[in-house]
Image: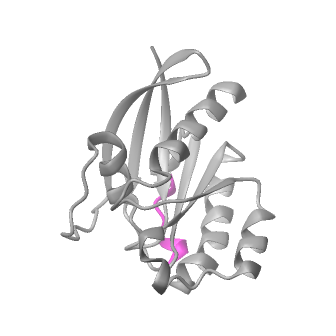
Amino acid sequence: MIQKKVCMVGVYGTGKTSLVRQFVHAKFSEKYLSTVGVKIDRKPVRAADQDVNLLLWDLEGRDEVQDINTSYLRGAAGIFYVVDGTRRETITQVFDLRTAVENAVGEVPAVLALNKVDLADAWIVTESDREALHRIPWHMFDTSARTGDGVEAAFLWLAATMQAAR
């Protein structure tokens, strides 16, 4: 079975850990637990007619992009960026995060999750935000770690794209 390393990247509190938990265990918890360092989970999936073991590296979120620990990014076959649709700063910070990640690992397949779609009434994502985000070569998904909306589709799209890129 092929293994592919996926790094979950985003500033603090965007829902990276909750998305992984929803994808791997089909669970959501209201308790907020901040990731310290990195937490690694794995999930076998079928992508591009092949069994793939996804190694999900959930990197701790930081408020400052320059604090990202790029050593955790080494060997990543894909990047899963996460922004919180209820916090504008996470949308603007993802552009700087992308630059830091690409400086560390180059261009690899990437997904952008606009997370917390279940809180649509509190969303501040505008059409111009979406247009700016669409200019980047990543595939965007509206996701909810709470309800599971878009979560599996985003991970499976990334797995298939990593397989096609190898």
Please identify the quarter of the rendering in which residue 141 is found: bottom right
Side of 30 relative to 59 (left or right): left
- Residue 156, x across and y down, in percent: 53, 37
- Look at the image and say whether residue 68 sits in the magenta stretch: yes
Q: Nearer the viewer, residue 105 or 80?
A: 80
Side of 133 relative to 42 (left or right): right
Q: Quadrant of the N terminus?
A: top left
Q: Relative to 130, does residue 57 appear above or below in the rendering?
A: above
Residue 116 showing in the rendered view: no
Q: Nearer the viewer, residue 19 or 42?
A: 19
Q: Nearer the viewer, residue 33 or 152?
A: 152
Q: Quadrant of the C terminus?
A: top right
What residue is shown at x 40% (from left), y 73% (from top)? 12
Q: Which residues are magenta?
A: 64-70
Side of 14 relative to 76 (left or right): left
Side of 48 relative to 156 (left or right): right
- Residue 124, x across and y down, in percent: 57, 85
Please identify the quarter of the rendering in which residue 160 is found: top right
Q: Relative to 96, does residue 60 appear above or below in the rendering?
A: above
What residue is shown at x 46% (from left), y 50% (from top)? 151
What residue is shown at x 38% (from left), y 55% (from top)? 19
What residue is shown at x 72% (from left), y 46% (from top)? 107
Residue 45 showing in the rendered view: yes
Q: Relative to 141, does residue 6 appear above or below in the rendering?
A: above
Give the image's coloring scheme: one colour
- Look at the image and say whether residue 37 sits in the magenta stretch: no
Q: Nearer the viewer, residue 103 or 92?
A: 92
- Residue 31, x across and y down, in percent: 18, 69
